[in-house]
Image: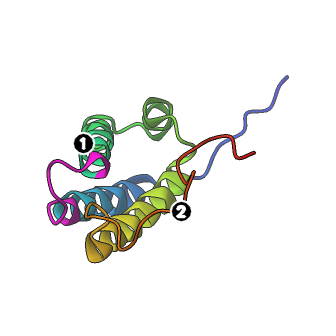
Amino acid sequence: MASKILKATTNITGLAALKLLYGKILRDLKNIPETSAYRKYTEDIINSRLEHVENEPNIARLERKINCGQIEEVIVQAENELMCARRMALNHVWGPLASQAPPNQWKWPII
C-alpha cells in the first residue's frame, strides 16, 4: 500500500500575505509611468496572480495555476518583486541614460 505524503503549506496566512504583497506591488507600480514596459508587464502578471489567489482556496490548485513553485516560494518572489518595483521607481529607470552607452553596449553576442 502506497503511503500518502502531505505537504505542509502556509494556507490562509500565506494567502493573506500574498494578497497584501500583491496590493503593495500594484500600489507602488503607480509611481512608474504607464508607458514603462516594466510597469505594464508586471501589472499584468500581478493582476493575473491576484485573481487566482482571490478565486482559488485550494493551495495545490493555486500553485498549479500560478505555476511558479510552492506558495511559500511565490511569497518570496512577491517580496522580491516589491523591492524591485520600489527600486525601479526610486531610480527612475525609464528616464534617459545618465551618460552615453559604450559602443556595442546593446550588441549580442559580444565578440
Amino acid type assigned to the residue bearing label 1 in the image: Asn
Report the residue at 21% width, 66% height from top.
28
How many labels were placed on the picture?
2
Which of discs 2 and 1 lies nearer the camera? The answer is: 2
Q: Is residue 71 rendered to the left or right of residue 58?
A: right
Residue at (31%, 36%) from the top-left corner? 52
Badge 2 crowding class, 10 Å Cα cut-off, few under 14, some 14 to 19, many 20 or more, is few
Q: Which image quadrant: the N terminus? A: top right
Which structural element holds mark 2?
Answer: loop
Q: Secondary structure at mark 1?
A: helix
Relative to 7, say whether 28 is above or below: below
| Chain part drawn in magenta | 28-38
Q: Amino acid at mark 2?
A: Pro
Q: In this picture, is 99 found above or below 7?
A: below
Q: In which quadrant of the rendered view does residue 29 lie?
A: bottom left
Q: Is residue 30 magenta-colored?
A: yes
The residue beneath circle 1 is 47
